[in-house]
Amino acid sequence: MTPSGQGHAHQTDKEVEMEPRDLSKLRIQADDRWSADGRRRRHIFLWAGIAASCSAVLAVLLWWGVLSPPIEVRTAKVVTMFPSRALTVLNASGYVVAQRKAAVSSKATGRLEKLFVEEGRAVKKGDILAQLENEDLEATLEEAKALLRVAEASLRNAEAELRDATLNYHRMQSLRETGSVSTQTFDSAEARYKKATAIHRRAQFETERAAASIKVAEVNLEYSLIRAPFDGVILTKNADEGEVVAPFGASLNARAAVATMADMRSLMVEVDVAESSLEKVRVGGPVEIRLDAFPGDRFPGRVHMIVPTADRSKATVLTKLTFDELDEKILPEMSAKAAFLSRALRKDENRQFLSIPEAALRDSPDGNAVFQVKDGKARLVPITMGRRWNDTVEVLSELQEGDVIVLRSDKDLNDGDRIKVPE
């Protein structure tokens, strides 16, 4: 064989030897192709699963409302209140004021000798509260009584003289008619009679003047006794024994009043009502009065008077309220608040109750319900209702004081909706 043939044969053998290797390469490439297809399929399945999961999560979130925008709502709280609050049309504040009140003073000037009062003491009309020094006035009274006795003695003497003169005159008059006495004798009897009559009249006048002097002395003596002008209670003591008391405090160091007293039966509440709200107030209308000193007590009352004048500086009108029943613990000058009611309270309307606004009620298959705010969502809660007072409803079950409920919303609410409360 030629070298070239040998080379050819050699080349052929080499090619023969390389064929299996080429096949193996082809097999490897085919496996790689199938492996890549599997990875692609796995990727497709993976992404399909992820998409399905996301769709499921999205559906759940949509069902839960997480992805929906929250609904804006207005809320209110469940509160405990009295029926009067639900019936209140107007509130006002003021003070307890005694309509009969006096700063008791003396009409005479003098030094205070005795003082019979203390704060809180009940007195009757005419009781002596204090006494000024009055020895001179008592002496003047005794002198006037003595003068009266002298005048009365003179009057008795004049009466005797007049009686005798009268008898003599009548006798002389009878004798003159018979001519038994002279004209001169008759004239003397007549003059004596007239003189006795004049003296008697003067004695009467002197007696009346002496009696009047006694009255003057008694009045002056009475001025030294300071008495209670009406039944009441002593509020303040303004002077002490030994101090000078003068009418109207005429002296710089004198006391004008000995004590201040008030008739506790005349206590009223005086409040200022704005002119713009005056139409809500009517004489005889029901009110509920609360005192700051006794926050737990509520006192029913009525509108007694709307004072027919306004205060231009405050644009208010003074209104006086009376208590239906006065309590001993009510004192003058206590701070008070008054609620003007649309109607009078009944006897069974004096206890507190759990309340919600009527606007918060919703219809549900179980009856009345409200949307309660919990964790940013509206939860439909069935409730048991009690009585109604205007736009307020009594709640008997399910809710508690302080719970937040939906009052109104921009859209219709469903149980579980996300909500937003504007600030």
Image: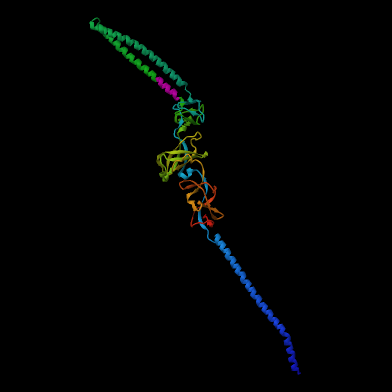
Q: Residue at x 62, y 71 (%)?
A: 43
Q: Residue furthest bottom?
A: 2
Relative height, residue 294 to residue 204 (above, below): below
Nearer to me, 140 or 30 = 30
Q: Residue furthest front?
A: 365
Residue 234: x and y in percent read 49, 30
Residue 317 visible in the snapshot:
yes
Residue 40: x and y in percent read 63, 73
Nearer to me, 21 or 229 = 21
Report the side of 20 relative to 394 (left or right). Answer: right
Relative height, residue 87 to residue 123 (above, below): below
Nearer to me, 116 or 381 = 381
Q: Residue furthest top?
A: 180
Residue 91: x and y in percent read 46, 43
Place residue 315 in its image quadrant.
Answer: top left
Q: Residue at x 72, y 85 (%)?
A: 18
Residue 188 visible in the snapshot:
no
Relative height, residue 411 to residue 199 (above, below): below
Nearer to me, 380 or 250 = 380
* Residue 218 part of the magenta segment: yes
- Numbered marks: total: 0
Q: Which residues are magenta?
A: 213-223
Residue 348: x and y in percent read 48, 40
Main SS of the magenta part reads helix
Report the side of 154 relative to 102 (left or right). Answer: left
* Residue 28 part of the magenta segment: no
